[in-house]
Amino acid sequence: MVQTLVSKIQPSPERVRPSSPANDPSREVSGTPAASSTSQDRAFQPGFLALQVRTFTLTWLSYSSYYFTRKNLSVCKSRLHDDLGLSMTALGSIDTLYLASYALGMFLSGTLGDRIGARRLLTIGMLGSAAVAVWFGLSSSLLAFALAFSLNGAFQSTGWPGNVKAMQPFFSQSTRGRVMGLWTTNYQVGGLIATALATYVLTHYGWRAAFIGPATWVALIGITIFTLLVERPEDRGFAPVEPVAVLRPEATAAAASAQPSPPEESLLALFLRMPILWALGSAYFALKMIRYSLLFWLPYYLRQHLHYDEAAAGYGSMPFEIGGVIGSISVGWLSDRYFRTRRLKLSVPLLFVLGVALLAYQKLGGMGLLVNALVLGVCGFLLFGPDSLLSGTMAQDLGGRKATARVAGIINGMGSTGAIFSPILVAVIKEQLGWSALFYSFFLLTLLAGSLLGVAAWLHTNRPQVAS
């Protein structure tokens, strides 16, 4: 499936002349096919197609696997409450520590990823996350749980900037919406599989095994990434997909005069120079607060409020991410087909409709398993489509090869800051005002996110582009 999609939409670049070093800047900016032709003009190269498929598959598998050591806590919350007496407030505090560490780590991982490369960043993150998940599974105290899962947040934060950076050099802007729309199904499918696996292991082997077992898989994928991931087309003798001369004209003069490259722009300088990042990050703040509230608390809501049994509560939360898979692919395709230079304008109305769908879910969710699944799937479609476009495709479009990890880190770091407040939002509003008030809060957040994304869409028409 991936190979068919890529072969249709992503013509591959010509091979670099064997006599030229793969990292020679003069080859990238003048007098070579890389500088004189576009990706659409280049001949089909099966070798490069195989490299694209390899990169797509490895990074998709990597990010989806991160969820194996993330979603198990949400599935096991009721058991931790029943077996160890952990209150809803205590469980929420673990979430808050995790999300705070994740948000801070996102900014740092973005900078680190642009410095040390995606392969090493992802290896560190996956092996570290696996180790602390095992620690969590072997522990019994609230303090140990809190420490382990806060460290897990830091390691988990490497996943998005690292994998988005690894994907960026292999696909052109003209096809990025479709490719990334398919690729960003990793966090819906990963969440689905992780939820199903944790639910199965929980009900058959206990909550400790639900942390230790999935950690083994994550460690194996981390080792695979270190062994097999290729970070740039040039590392296998291919010219860049998008010529550096097209995206960064000043590189020609720099290469000709043999001057050193300018220093890498700091995270703060990048943020201050591109106001669109403020709007995108603020919109993602609100959107991710909703997403993480649902991801972390849907099984609990189904178990405690709608009185599903333990297995049904775990599996019953899955339509949210199933709808998200369809939404990511559909919105990505539509953005390439009709909104390539104005992708954000596609997302704004979807967010306003999402608010209505969330209110409908609160009213209709108790009408049976089928109705619950259908409305939850619609909510997932409307949320994950804009989410994947905002956090993946736009980060690559704005950041280019040199700054993709930093731009992804800024957008997702601000979004994850919003996610920090999701446990507080759920716990406080539910305890004080009830579940209905919580869903009205979600509705207001979608209005805020849609409005901010409208501002970002306006700024996008006059954005400065980061050097690629």
Image (cartoon, rainbow, N blue to C red):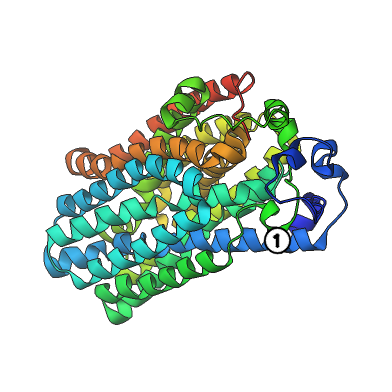
Please report the residue visible at 45 percent of the width from the left and 61 percent of the height from the top: 123
Name the one closer to the observer, 256 or 127: 256
Instruction: Tell me where residue 206 sits by quadrant.
Output: bottom left
Q: Quadrant of the N terminus?
A: bottom right
Say whether residue 71 is left or right of residue 114.
Answer: left
Q: What residue type is labelled 1?
A: Leu
Q: Where is residue 14 in the image (x, y as percent from the top left)?
A: 82, 51
Instruction: Tell me where residue 392 sits by quadrant.
Output: top right
Reading the image, the residue beneath label 1 is 51
Q: Where is residue 2 in the image (x, y as percent from the top left)?
A: 70, 61
Task: State the SS at label 1.
Answer: helix
On screen, 76 above or below 386?
below
Please report the residue visible at 63 percent of the width from the left and 59 percent of the height from the top: 55
Name the one closer to the observer, 451 or 358: 451
Please report the residue visible at 74 percent of the width from the left and 32 percent of the height from the top: 245
Q: How crowded is mark 1: few (under 14 residues within 10 Å), some or many (20 or more)?
A: some
Please report the residue visible at 70 percent of the width from the left and 58 percent of the height from the top: 52
Q: Position of residue 312 (x, y in %)?
A: 37, 68
Q: In which quarter of the image is the C terminus?
A: top right
Q: Can residue 373 be seen in this view?
A: no
On screen, 461 above or below 341?
above
Say whether residue 96 is left or right of residue 401.
Answer: left
User: Can you name the residue that lies furthest to the bottom here?
Assistant: 204
Say whether residue 16 is left or right of residue 298.
Answer: right
